[in-house]
Amino acid sequence: MLGVLVEKQHTVPDTYPLSLNALTAGCNQKTARSPVIEASDAEVLTAVDGLKGLSLVFEGSGSRVVKFEHNMGRVLGLPGQSVALLTVLMLRGPQTTAELRVNCERLHRFADLSSVEGFLDELAAKTPPWVVKLPRAPGSREARWAHLLCGEVAMPEPTAAYAGAIGEGGVAAGEIAALKAEQARLAAEVERLRAQVRRITSELGLPDDDGPGPTT
């Protein structure tokens, strides 16, 4: 909810603040969301009331239709860069530093990855922390970041399929199979080369590893 208000302030400023219908539509949109939800107007209003109680959202004035605005940066005392990062994490779920830089483009343009990491480190160092760097998932090259505005992040338990794919010592069974196949291929290649060497040495009348060559 809060993330939608921040996002729409930047992406559709002409229609910001948002009416209840626009806010609900923003919460339920199918793109740039993880997870995708299907919230009702009543559920959105309940969430808005909770945010209003924290002064993070307030009702705008000067319109016959009730519209809502966020007050995130001021209440939390955060610069725009940090607000952008938290917004994208709220809307899209855990992401790597590179993904955050790309997905924040319309809210704030970070100069490089180190700039993103700097603001993430600041958010993680707060008491209590507002973001956390998750353990790198098996098969992933980079760790992902998640926000803590709704409490601790629930880490998914390894699935039975994943557990079955892990061999002795925590090495993936698929990786072991690939190594064995490569070993067999190399052994066959070595044997082929040995046979070729034996044939050549025999034709030239030279001794080989299997014993003395033909005598003349």
Image (cartoon, rainbow, N blue to C red):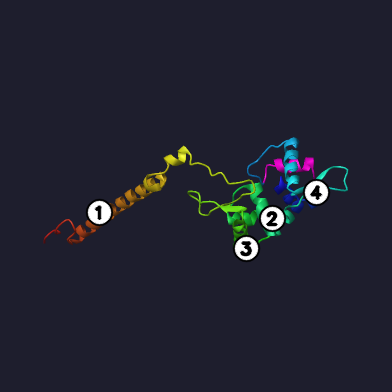
- What is the x, y in percent for residue 90? 65, 48
- Of helix, strand and loop, which mostly describes the magenta segment? helix
Q: Is residue 46 above or below residue 176?
A: above
Residue 169 in the figure: left or right of residue 22: left
Write down the residue under mark 3. Answer: 115
The 10 Å Cα crowd at callout 1, few under 14, some 14 to 19, many 20 or more, is: few
Is there any visible trace of residue 114 in the rendered image? yes
Residue type at numbered disc 2? Val
Give the foreground label among 1 and 3: 3
Task: Check disc 2: other Cα within 10 Å, few if <14, some if 14-19, many if 20+.
Answer: many
Q: Going by the image, does 117 lie left or right of 194?
A: right
Point 73% across, 47% down: residue: 54
Q: Which residue is mark 2?
A: 83
Crowding at mark 4 (Cα within 10 Å: few <14, some 14-19, many 20+): many
Q: For marks 3 and 4, give the CA distance.
A: 30 Å
Decide which of tag 1 and tag 3 comes sooner along the chain. 3
Q: Is tag 2's residue or tag 1's residue first in the polypeptide sequence?
A: 2
Q: How far, Cα to Cα, is label 2 from label 1?
A: 68 Å
Quadrant into which the N terminus falls:
top right
- Residue 188: in magenta span: no
Q: Amino acid at mark 3?
A: Ser
Q: Earlier in the sequence, mark 3 or mark 4?
A: 4
- The answer to the question of whether label 1 and label 3 lie on touching residues, with beta carbons closer than 8 A, is no
Q: Where does label 4 land, which residue?
A: 17
Task: Look at the image and tell me in which quarter the C terminus lies.
Answer: bottom left
Q: Nearer the viewer, mark 4 or mark 1?
A: 4
Which residue is most to the left? 216
Q: Tell me which numbered mark, 4 or 1, is placed earlier along the sequence.
A: 4
